[in-house]
Amino acid sequence: MCEANVYWRDEAGDEVLFFENVDLLTPEGDKLILRDIFGRSKIVTARIETMQLTEHRIVITRGAAAEVYDKAH
């Protein structure tokens, strides 16, 4: 399996689980579009901080306006 879990880096510097089983991450301007293996999507104003592909782990940090949109397909 090649999916990853996505974590927020919060204001205290801690990593908080944000979205599991992500198989597609598409940057679009100041937003990231995330889709999981079940077809659910989230669009979030954020940037990628780190990607550890062998650990199936992506850490993101909030953008200026932390918006999250959930979309079900």
Image (cartoon, rainbow, N blue to C red):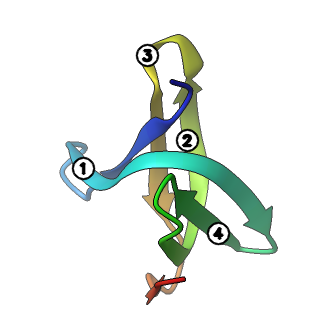
Q: Residues within 10 Å of mark 2 (few under 14, many from 20)?
A: few
What label sits on residue 49 in the rendered view?
Answer: 2
Q: Picture quarter containing residue 27?
A: bottom right
C-alpha distance separating marks 1 and 4: 16 Å
When the figure is inspected, residue 32 is found, relative to residue 69, above or below; the finding is: above
Q: Residues within 10 Å of mark 1 (few under 14, many from 20)?
A: few
Query: What amino acid type is highlighted by mark number 3?
Result: Glu
What label sits on residue 33 in the rendered view?
Answer: 4
Read off the residue under disc 3: 55
Q: Secondary structure at mark 4?
A: strand
When the figure is inspected, residue 21 is found, relative to residue 55, above or below; the finding is: below
Query: What amino acid type is highlighted by mark number 2?
Result: Glu
Q: Residues within 10 Å of mark 4 (few under 14, many from 20)?
A: some
Q: Nearer the viewer, residue 29 or 55?
A: 55
Left or right: residue 68 versus residue 54 is left
Read off the residue under disc 1: 17
C-alpha distance separating marks 3 and 4: 21 Å
Left or right: residue 17 versus residue 7 is left
Q: Picture quarter containing residue 35?
A: bottom right
Residue at the image point whose x is 80% and y is 71% from the top: 28
Q: Nearer the viewer, residue 58 or 64?
A: 58
Query: What amino acid type is highlighted by mark number 4?
Result: Ile
Query: What amino acid type is highlighted by mark number 1?
Result: Leu
